[in-house]
Image (spheres, rainbow, N blue to C red):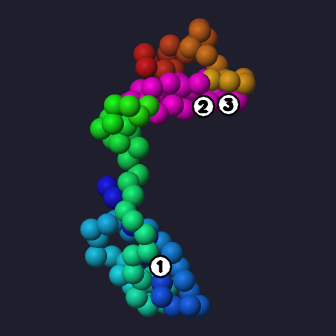
């Protein structure tokens, strides 16, 4: 999914907002109904898909002081599903060596 930014032409409004690149929505400002042309190049929000297309790109995440074992397990499962290369744990974050981590991470 690709997005582009639109900006209102009204000098008193100048609202800037993202819309899908191929969407007819957003041609007019949602507040003042003035024309809102595209103001920049398209971008994508799918970083994991981009990393899979480019094998040289690797995505990592840093968990700093995430104290909840359940939250860390959920993050491990999410990272596994998204294809992250590494999870770096620091601070008071429980590690996979914790006896209850296998249960919360569900094998991720």
Does the magenta segment cover residue 83? yes
Marks 3,2: beta carbons within 8 A = yes
Does the magenta segment cover residue 104? no
In the depicted structure, whether residue 58 falls above or below residue 15: above
Q: Residue at x 39, y 76 (%)?
A: 38
Residue 12 falls left or right of residue 106:
right
| Distance from Cα at disc 1 to Cα at disc 2 | 34 Å
Numbered label attached to residue 62:
2
Q: Residue at x 39, y 65 (%)?
A: 41
Task: Residue 3 in the image: state x and y as whole percent.
Answer: 37, 62
Please identify the quarter of the rendering in which residue 1 is found: bottom left
Extent of the magenta region = 59-88
Task: Residue 24 in the image: state x and y as whole percent.
Answer: 28, 76
Element at label 1: strand
In the depicted structure, whether residue 42 falls above or below residue 58: below
Q: Residue at x 41, y 34 (%)?
A: 57
Numbered label attached to residue 7:
1
Q: Residue at x 32, y 66 (%)?
A: 21
Choose the circle earlier in sequence order: 3 or 1: 1
Residue 5 falls left or right of residue 15:
left
Q: Between residues 51 and 25, which one lies in front from this camera angle?
A: 51
Residue beneath label 3, please? Answer: 64
**Within 10 angstroms of label 1, few (less than 14), some, or many (20 or more) residues?**
many
Q: Between residues 30 and 102, which one lies in front from this camera angle?
A: 30
| Distance from Cα at disc 3 to Cα at disc 2 | 6 Å
Marks 3,1: beta carbons within 8 A = no
Numbered label attached to residue 95:
none
């Amino acid at each position: 999914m690709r997005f582009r930014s639109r900006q209102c032409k009204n000098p008193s409004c100048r609202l800037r907002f993202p819309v899908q690149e191929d969407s007819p929505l957003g041609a007019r400002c949602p507040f003042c109904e003035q024309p809102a042309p595209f103001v920049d190049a398209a971008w994508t929000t799918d970083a994991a898909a981009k990393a899979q297309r480019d094998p040289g790109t690797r995505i990592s995440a840093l968990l700093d002081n995430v104290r909840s074992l359940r939250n860390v397990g959920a993050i491990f499962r999410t990272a596994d599903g998204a294809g992250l290369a590494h999870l770096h744990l620091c601070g008071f974050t429980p590690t996979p060596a914790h006896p209850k981590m296998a249960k919360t991470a569900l094998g991720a």
